[in-house]
Image: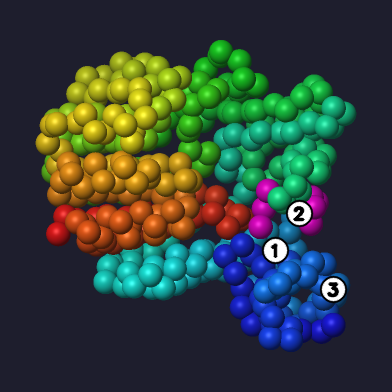
């Protein structure tokens, strides 16, 4: 069956219609004419794969990764990098418009190096091989290297034992590599600040774009001149410490105990004595906060902010909220709840995960 691809979705699939039913075509791009085969039929849509390309998009490239067709790690590896940025930009702005959020400043998208940017990878094992999973499955694709990963990690993948899953993380300060879920830690830096990272602690995987994002947050804080800052889901204290020299005090809250242990260590090595870090569930601990805060910074996991935490954020009534998100769906859900008390003023995008459909956004909200 030959079809023309009319649209391209957020997950990197082409979209066409067959017998008035939407069809998602893996491996096809907008404007292409392709021969397809339907691989799964659903009530309201179908899934298809490309058999042959008849007319190719100008944005199409050949992925340099030998595992691209099988591995689920990349989604946009056959598009020019410029086209991937345009796709991510479009997906966020269209979703905001669909939800009647149009009265804000869009400040553009900041890109980075498309390959070798990840400082961390988790490899899975089938008992004999290490690799990555096919998309939406537990079928292992054995690999010897990953083009998204820092080459210092790629150099040791072949030497690792193959019997169990293993996590690797590399420092940007030196060649120190963390292998597995051991009690050892490494030190990495963002700008002039240094951070100790334990195996269980969260740390952004893209050092280059993280620096750009944190510099932007630093500018916002410098412009707004807050005295007291509340940093929710603070991790190992990266943002709290990064902006600490601009404010009177910062309180960071995080549920992962190892992360808070790291945060308190990082406070000492960066001489950020005006920061305080507490271990607890944000949605519960925030209820106990009685102090006034001029600024709330929130950088939640993909699940977004708990509804109870959102309600408490509005009670605290800070003039400004900086919301950092890696999931557009939970971001928009949370923005709609915050609309009761806050107005979205601006959004800026950061391509933290090149060659995937993920995008990091920074929203500035002001109290109405």
Q: Dividing the image into 4 quarters, which one contains the C terminus?
A: bottom left
| Alpha carbon separation for disc pair 3 and 2 | 20 Å
Q: Is residue 84 left or right of residue 130?
A: left
| Identity of the residue furthest to the top in this view | 183
Q: Which residue is mark 3?
A: 37
Proximity of marks 1 and 2: CB atoms separated by less than 8 Å:
yes
Mark 3: few/some/many CA within 10 Å (<14, 14-19, 20+):
some
- Residue 56, position in %: x, y? 74, 78
Magenta stretch: give its range. Answer: 66-75
Element at badge 3? strand
In the figure, residue 232 lies in which quadrant? top left
What kind of colouring is applied to the model shown?
rainbow
Label located before the other in sequence (1 or 3):
3
| Alpha carbon separation for disc pair 1 and 3 | 20 Å
Label located before the other in sequence (1 or 2):
2
Element at badge 2? loop
**Relative depth, front residue between 7 and 87:** 7
Q: Which residue is mark 2?
A: 68
Q: Which residue is mark 1?
A: 78
Q: Residue at x 82, y 84 (%)?
A: 2
Magenta region, mostly helix, strand or loop? loop
């Amino acid at each position: 069956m030959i079809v023309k691809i009319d649209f391209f979705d957020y997950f990197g699939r082409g979209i066409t219609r067959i017998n008035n039913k939407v069809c998602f075509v893996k491996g096809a791009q907008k404007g292409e004419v392709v021969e397809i085969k339907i691989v799964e039929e659903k009530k309201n849509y179908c899934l298809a794969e490309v058999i042959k390309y008849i007319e190719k998009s100008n944005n199409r490239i050949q992925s340099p990764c030998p595992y691209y067709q099988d591995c689920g790690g990349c989604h946009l590896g056959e598009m020019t990098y410029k086209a991937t940025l345009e796709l991510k930009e479009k997906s966020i702005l269209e979703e905001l418009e669909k939800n009647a959020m149009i009265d804000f400043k869009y400040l553009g998208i900041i890109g980075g190096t498309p390959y070798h940017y990840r400082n961390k990878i988790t490899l899975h094992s089938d008992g004999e091989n290490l690799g990555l999973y096919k998309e939406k499955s537990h079928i292992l694709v054995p690999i010897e290297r990953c083009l998204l990963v820092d080459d210092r990690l790629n150099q040791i993948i072949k030497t690792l034992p193959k019997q169990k899953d293993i996590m690797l993380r590399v420092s940007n300060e030196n060649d120190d590599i963390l292998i597995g879920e051991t009690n050892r830690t490494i030190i990495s830096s963002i700008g002039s600040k240094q951070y100790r990272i334990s195996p269980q602690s969260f740390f952004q995987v893209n050092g280059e774009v993280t620096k750009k994002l944190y510099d932007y947050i630093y500018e916002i804080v410098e412009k707004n001149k807050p005295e007291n800052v509340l940093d929710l889901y603070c991790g190992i204290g990266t943002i709290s410490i990064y902006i600490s020299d601009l404010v009177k005090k910062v309180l960071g809250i995080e549920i992962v105990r190892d992360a808070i242990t790291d945060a308190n260590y990082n406070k000492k090595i960066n001489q950020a004595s005006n920061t305080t870090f507490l271990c607890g569930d944000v949605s519960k601990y925030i209820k106990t906060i009685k102090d006034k805060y001029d600024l709330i910074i929130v950088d939640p996991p993909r699940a977004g902010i708990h509804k109870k935490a959102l309600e408490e954020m509005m009670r605290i009534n800070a003039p400004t909220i900086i919301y950092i998100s890696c999931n557009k769906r939970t971001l928009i859900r949370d923005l709609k709840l915050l609309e009761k008390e806050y107005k979205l003023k601006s959004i800026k995008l950061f391509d933290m995960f090149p060659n995937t459909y993920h995008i990091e956004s920074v929203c500035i909200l002001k109290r109405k």
